[in-house]
Each structure stands twice: as structure tokens, then as C-alpha cells.
Amino acid sequence: MRDTTCSKADVAGEWAYTETGTVIPATGAVPFAAVARYTLDAKGDLSGTATSSSDGNLANVTLKGTGTVNADCTGTLTVGVYASGTLVRTATFSIVYVDKAREGRAIVTSLVLASGATVPAVLTANAKKLLPELPHER
């Protein structure tokens, strides 16, 4: 039987992702897309940058958050999105790591504005390590 367990050390590294879908504020559904680059360290700390388009409005933001990983290669990412140093929203992702923790598939399970308001969303993300290493190559 193959070893299919994951650890924080396995998922630590430099990542890039694309995120697409729909955000549904009170004013009506709007398309959303983003590309990002982030670092996730072996302690679970996340930091990075992203460029997003919400209904055609572009924004460059900073990402700060945390990540967890379970032995079955599932986990969560909780990401604060900051514009000019001010928290705009917090997104929580449910993620599954695949291909020996070199890629991830995620869905947003919670999107909360800085005001505390929850916004419904249907957003998915695909992530890939920028410089993947096999665990035995570290």
C-alpha cells in the first residue's frame, strides 16, 4: 500500500493559485477571479499577494493567514485579504492536496467582510507548488 499521508512539512512551500466563481452580495451575483502567489511555512503561516477582478474591478491585495493539513491530505486555509494594510475580507478554503502535495484543489466555505457580514459565494481554486520537491528530496 502506498503512503498517502500529508504533513505541514509536505505542504510547506511557495504556491500559486487561480480562483474563479461567483460572489453573491445583496446587490446581486457578480463574477470573481483571482491569481495569487503565497508562501505556506511548516508552522502553517501563510503570506502572499494577489490580483483579483470582482465584476471587472481590479484590485491588488496582500494575503495573510494560516493553513492546516490533516494526515488524509485535506485541510483548511484561512486567508485575510488586505488592501493598503486594511482588512477587506476573510476567506476560508477547504483544500485537498494531490500529486504528493504538489497541487491543491479548494472551495471557499466562508467569505466574511471586515464588517462581519457573511457573503454567499461559489468560488473554487486550483493551486500548484512553484518549486515542488518530493519529501525525500528535502
Image (spheres, rainbow, N blue to C red):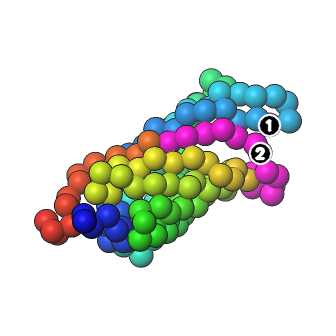
Q: Is residue 24 magenta?
A: no
What is the residue that sits farthest to the bottom in this orientation?
43
Q: Are marks 2 and 1 in contact (CB under 8 Å)?
A: yes
**Quadrant occupied by the C terminus:** bottom left
SS class, disc 1 = loop
Task: Report the number of numbered marks.
Answer: 2
SS class, disc 2 = loop
- Residue 113 appearing in the image: yes
> Residue at coordinates 81% horizontally, 28% vertically from top-left?
28
Report crowding for label 1: few under 14, some 14 to 19, many 20 or more residues within 10 A (C-alpha).
few
Label drawn at residue 119: 2
Q: Position of residue 59 (x, y in %)?
A: 58, 36
- The reply, left or right, for residue 9 in relation to residue 88 is left
> Residue at coordinates 55% horizontally, 40% vertically from top-left?
124
| Residue tagged 1 | 25
Q: Is residue 122 magenta?
A: yes
- The reply, left or right, for residue 89 in relation to residue 75 is right
Q: Position of residue 84 (x, y in %)?
A: 60, 50
- Residue 89 appearing in the image: no
What's drawn in magenta, residue-wise? 113-125
Which three-letter amino acid code belongs to the residue tagged 2?
A: Val
Q: In the depicted view, which residue is nearer to us: 15 or 114?
A: 15
**Quadrant occupied by the N terminus:** bottom left
Check the image and report above or below for 62 versus 69. above
Report crowding for label 2: few under 14, some 14 to 19, many 20 or more residues within 10 A (C-alpha).
some
